Image (tube, rainbow, N blue to C red):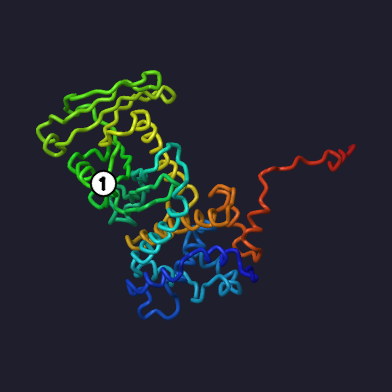
């Protein structure tokens, strides 16, 4: 029941704080810490994400301006730029990564029946990466090119609800395909991959685990057709073949049969050839599934626009990872609150409303219920009469 809490405190009630305490104990995050705990650090950086703070000084100034309300927000330690910088530099980033994984599990359970555009009961993941450009002199550990640094966010996105099932933060020099080595395949799940992940040895590991993949074929792929299926050419399909690789290396790396589907997307003017290990879905569904992979691109665009991950509060790998994982925790937390409160608003609108009402002491449901998309036209009778000069 609402008891005069700030909107920020009410939002934080959706967090499993006991799980965060277990993560802190696992990595001894509060060992010999007296004045600024991991929980204080999480709340401060979550506040920064929700209100679009640009630097540690910005966070310090805004929170100190609301000093009487910090205790009721859950912040017990002294908020200062030095405390935040030291915590980001030395606290183990895995504390917040493990905590985010717990939030992700909760969100995926809430969104498990969410439609994503294809009538399929299986779990469907889209895997891709996005690059965030950085200054080489400040981030030498993430050198990407001769005069440039970058951080890559390799993301495995659950298409139901657009929830990131896992995120791997690496330097820009790490190739996308190497992240398949860290992937734990789920039997029966579909993995939608672009051509950057076309490595037959790694793809065969997915097949052996009972998972399915859909990816784009390269033009120089050597194969022979062993079977074919009829297709409806009016849908854009051109052929649906069963094939085996014949390349001297690829035939050994992937000895099992593959399915090759050619599809022309007249709407976007694309000529696409898919490779998949699945043989029981109809060919048009395979094409529709790969089209749904676009959701991961929309996810990257969304988080870059609405979360603070394009500029970082610290320059060390640890500080970067902490900021990324807390930003993702805030994204998932808002998705959980949207579902739990039955809000008929987009995540963008929820974030915008939170950003201007974070210190208010109204019930959180009332804050969102007062939002109205309809802008009323002014009454002509209320207009001022023009002056006769």
> In the figure, 139 relative to 123: above or below?
below
Image spot of residue 232 (x, y percent): 36, 20
Q: Nearer the viewer, residue 254 or 172?
A: 254
Residue 177: name its quadrant. Answer: top left
Image spot of residue 197 (x, y percent): 26, 40
Q: Nearer the viewer, residue 130 or 338?
A: 338
- View extreme (top): residue: 234
Q: How many marks?
A: 1
Q: Which residue lies under the disc numbered 1?
A: 146
- View extreme (right): residue: 388
Q: Please give left or right for residue 6 compared with residue 151 in the image.
A: right
Residue 255: name its quadrant. Answer: top left
Residue at 28% x, 51% y is 143
Residue at 37% x, 59% y is 320
Q: Please give left or right for residue 46 compared with residue 87 in the image.
A: right
Residue 174 in sight: no
Q: Nearer the viewer, residue 204 or 360?
A: 204
Q: Determine the secondary structure under disc 1.
A: loop
> In the figure, 149 relative to 106: above or below?
above
Q: Nearer the viewer, residue 288 or 265?
A: 288
Residue 311 in sight: yes
Residue at 63% x, 58% y is 365
Quadrant of the rendering where the C terminus is positioned: top right
Residue 188: name its quadrant. Answer: top left
Quadrant of the rendering where the N terminus is positioned: bottom right
What crowding class fits label 1: few (fewer than 14 Cα within 10 Å), some (14-19), or many (20 or more)? few
Image spot of residue 115 (x, y percent): 47, 42
């Amino acid at each position: 029941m609402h008891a005069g809490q700030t909107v920020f405190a009410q939002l934080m009630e959706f967090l499993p704080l006991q799980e965060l305490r277990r993560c802190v104990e696992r990595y001894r995050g509060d060992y010999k810490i007296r004045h600024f705990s991991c929980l204080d650090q999480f709340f401060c950086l979550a506040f920064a994400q929700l209100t679009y703070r640009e630097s540690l000084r910005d966070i310090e100034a805004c929170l100190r301006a609301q000093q009487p309300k910090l205790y009721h927000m859950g912040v017990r330690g002294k908020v200062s730029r030095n405390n935040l910088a030291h915590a980001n530099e030395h606290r183990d980033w895995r504390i917040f990564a493990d905590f985010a994984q717990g939030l992700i599990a909760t969100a995926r359970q809430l969104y498990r029946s969410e439609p994503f555009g294809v009538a399929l009961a299986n779990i469907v993941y889209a895997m891709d990466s996005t690059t965030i450009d950085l200054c080489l002199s400040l981030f030498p550990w993430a050198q990407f090119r001769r005069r440039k640094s970058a951080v890559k966010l390799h993301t495995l996105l659950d298409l139901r609800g657009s929830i990131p099932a896992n995120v791997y933060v690496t330097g820009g020099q790490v190739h996308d395909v190497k992240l398949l080595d860290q992937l734990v395949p789920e039997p029966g799940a579909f993995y939608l991959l672009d051509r950057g992940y076309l490595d037959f040895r790694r793809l065969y590991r997915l097949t052996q685990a009972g998972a399915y993949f859909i990816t784009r074929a390269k033009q120089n792929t050597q194969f022979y057709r062993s079977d074919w299926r009829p297709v409806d050419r009016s849908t854009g399909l051109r052929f649906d073949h069963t094939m085996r690789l014949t390349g001297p290396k690829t035939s050994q790396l992937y000895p099992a049969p593959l399915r090759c589907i050619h599809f022309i997307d007249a709407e976007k003017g694309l000529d696409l050839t898919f490779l998949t290990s699945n043989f029981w879905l109809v060919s048009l569904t395979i094409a529709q599934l790969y089209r749904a992979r676009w959701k991961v691109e929309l996810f990257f665009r969304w988080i870059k626009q609405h979360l603070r991950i394009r500029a970082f509060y610290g320059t060390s790998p640890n500080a970067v990872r902490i900021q990324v994982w807390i930003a993702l925790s805030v994204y998932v937390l808002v998705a959980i609150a949207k579902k739990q409160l039955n809000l008929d608003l987009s995540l963008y609108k929820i974030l915008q409303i939170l950003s201007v009402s974070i210190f208010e002491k109204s019930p959180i449901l009332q804050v969102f219920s007062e939002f109205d998309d309809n802008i009323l036209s002014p009454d002509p009778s209320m207009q001022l009469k023009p002056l006769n000069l």
